[in-house]
Image: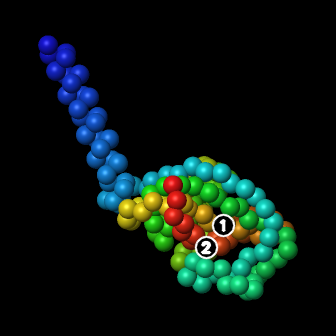
Amino acid sequence: MNKFKGTLVFIISVILLQTSCTKNAEVGIDSEFNELVGTWKMVRGYEYLVENGVKVPGSRSSYEREDLYYFVFHATGDVTTHDVRGIQLDKATYTFDKVGRIINFVERSVKLQFRVVELSSTTLNFTVFIKDGPDESLHDLYFKRSADLQRGR
């Protein structure tokens, strides 16, 4: 009987814990980073100026280059993309400041990190640029925009 009670308490505890974690992630109470894993696609192209998350038609950045590579990451989750704090590209973690410059290189792992700040079902699309410099160093990565926010699942 005691073994049955212990098993029942354990099962109920796990259910409550899972419910609590899910709720926290949805409403952004949890202070830990949530993680999404998605697919990276490498293409060639130009970097455009972005204002308030929208590409300015016909504009080009001051460091536009024909040999600029960029990666597009597609993932789905409950996120608000205006609060993206870090991104991991090609097994490397980068932190960005408000204008998208890399301010910190952390470690190698393929995943996206984001902090949930409000309940919002979205599709997260954003682009990271790699300038094909002479040494092709990690700090030559550039963040195009924090995200495009699209409704979806």
Residue 63 percent location from the top left of the image: 76, 81
For disc 1, the marked residue is 127
Which numbered disc flags the more N-terminal residue, 1 or 2?
1
Location of the N terminus by quadrant is top left
At label 1, which amino acid type do we have?
Thr
Question: Which image quadrant for residue 99?
Answer: bottom right
Depicted 29 relative to depicted 15: above or below: below
Depicted 114 relative to depicted 66: above or below: above
What is the spatial separation of the Cα atoms under label 1 and label 2, in whole angstroms? 7 Å
Return the mark for residue 145: 2
Looking at this view, is 140 or 63 the one in front?
Answer: 63
Q: How many marks?
A: 2
Horizontal side of residue 139 vs 97, given as left or right: right
Element at label 2: loop
User: Are there few (<14), some (14-19), or many (20+) residues within 10 Å of tag 1?
Assistant: many
Question: Which image quadrant for residue 78?
Answer: bottom left
Which residue is painted at 28% across and 47% down in the image? 20
Circles 1 and 2: CB atoms closer than 8 Å: yes
Depicted 50 relative to depicted 21: above or below: below
Residue at the extreme front of the image, as rendered: 152
Which residue is painted at 62% across and 57% down in the image? 74
Looking at this view, is 141 or 127 the one in front?
Answer: 127
User: Are there few (<14), some (14-19), or many (20+) residues within 10 Å of tag 2?
Assistant: many
Residue 21 percent location from the top left of the image: 33, 47
Residue 146 percent location from the top left of the image: 56, 71
Residue 22 percent location from the top left of the image: 35, 48
At label 2, which amino acid type do we have?
Arg
Element at label 1: strand
